[in-house]
Each structure stands twice: as C-alpha cells, then as structure tokens.
Image (cartoon, rainbow, N blue to C red):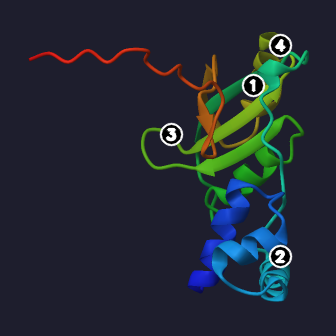
Amino acid sequence: MTQLEDRILKLLEQDCTMPRHVIAARCGIEESKVNETIACLEKEGVILSYQALIDWDKTKKETVTALIEVKVTPQRDKGFDRIAERIYQFDEVESVYLMSGSFDLTVIISGRTLKEVATFVSERLSVIEGVTGTATHFILKKYKEKHALFAKQEEQAERIAFV
C-alpha cells in the first residue's frame, strides 16, 4: 500500500462523504488521481462499503446492542471460519471478530428489546454446532465509535490550580 492510498483511506474513514476535490487538496494531488485510486481500492476489495455512523439514541427508534463472547470448538480443516460464517449470516449480526484470550469470537448484534437479543442468543446462536458457551454484555451507552464522539464531554468551566 502506498502512502497516498493510506492517506486517502484515512480521509474516507473519517468522512466517506468528503468530496473528491477536498481529498485531492488535502493530499496535494489532482482530483483525477483521487478518483483513479479510489476506483482501484474498490475493485481490489480494500474499500468494502460506505456507511453513515448513526447515533440512534437521538432518534425515536429503540434499539439494544449487545457484545457476545462466544467460545467454540474449531472444526477440522476449517478452524473457526465455518462457525464464524454461520454466525455472520444472521441479519441481527453486525460484526464478528476472531479473538485471542479467554473466548474465541466476539459477536455484535442489535435488536429491538433485551428479550429479542436474549432469544437470539439462546435459540439461534448457542445451538450452533461447535458453540460451547456464550456471555452476553449489553451496551448501555456509546461514547466513541470509529473515532466519532457520541456524547461530547462538557468542557470544564474553571480550572483550579493547586500550589
């Protein structure tokens, strides 16, 4: 990966709606070079999609997000991949990660209610062959995700200096 590609990717990750001419100006290159580089990165599968990061707490839609730790028995010749593939095909699943440590997979899901998430874990996730255990953690509040702040901390009005 070139330094130019890396710079363009970082700018797109910060704001995928950033106009191409702004990216070009920040990189010190022509807009046509930006378009060519982005097209190449899309074709190679480096850029997978463009998404908006939504603060659902500021909408009327009620959602519950959970992080689920999953312990699995890896399958012969497929390791963790086959089980991860079965899991990520569920519509509720937003992300699946292979982890190091005391559990094997992290699964991020969203549902309308706690009960809906619990039902998913008990009736769909935990019954998959090879899944040996789960631990569900409900996300209570998001502060920062993908470099974006959800709830900015109020600046301290006064600074007190102790001498």
Residue 12, above or below 141: below
Amino acid, disc 1: Val
Tell me, yes or no, whether the two marked residues, 4 and 1, touch with CB atoms within 8 Å.
no
The mark total stands at 4
Q: Which mark is residue 113?
A: 4
Q: Which mark is residue 103?
A: 3
Q: Secondary structure at mark 4?
A: loop
Amino acid, disc 3: Phe
Q: Splitting the image into 4 quarters, where does residue 116 fall?
A: top right
- In percent of width and height, residue 124 lies at 82, 30
Residue 104, above or below 114: below
Q: Earlier in the sequence, mark 3 or mark 4?
A: 3
| Residue for badge 2 | 42
Rounded to the nearest whole Å, what is the CA distance between mark 3 and mark 4?
Answer: 25 Å
Q: Secondary structure at mark 3?
A: loop
Amino acid, disc 2: Glu
Q: Earlier in the sequence, mark 1 or mark 3?
A: 3
Rounded to the nearest whole Å, what is the CA distance between mark 1 and mark 3?
Answer: 16 Å
Label 4: few (<14), some or many (≥20) within 10 Å? few
In the displayed structure, does residue 58 sit left or right of residue 160?
right
Rounded to the nearest whole Å, what is the CA distance between mark 4 and mark 1?
Answer: 13 Å
Task: Evaluate whether residue 134 shows in this view.
Answer: yes
Tell me, yes or no, whether the two marked residues, 3 and 4, touch with CB atoms within 8 Å.
no
Residue 68, above or below 158: below
Amino acid, disc 4: Thr
| Residue for badge 1 | 121
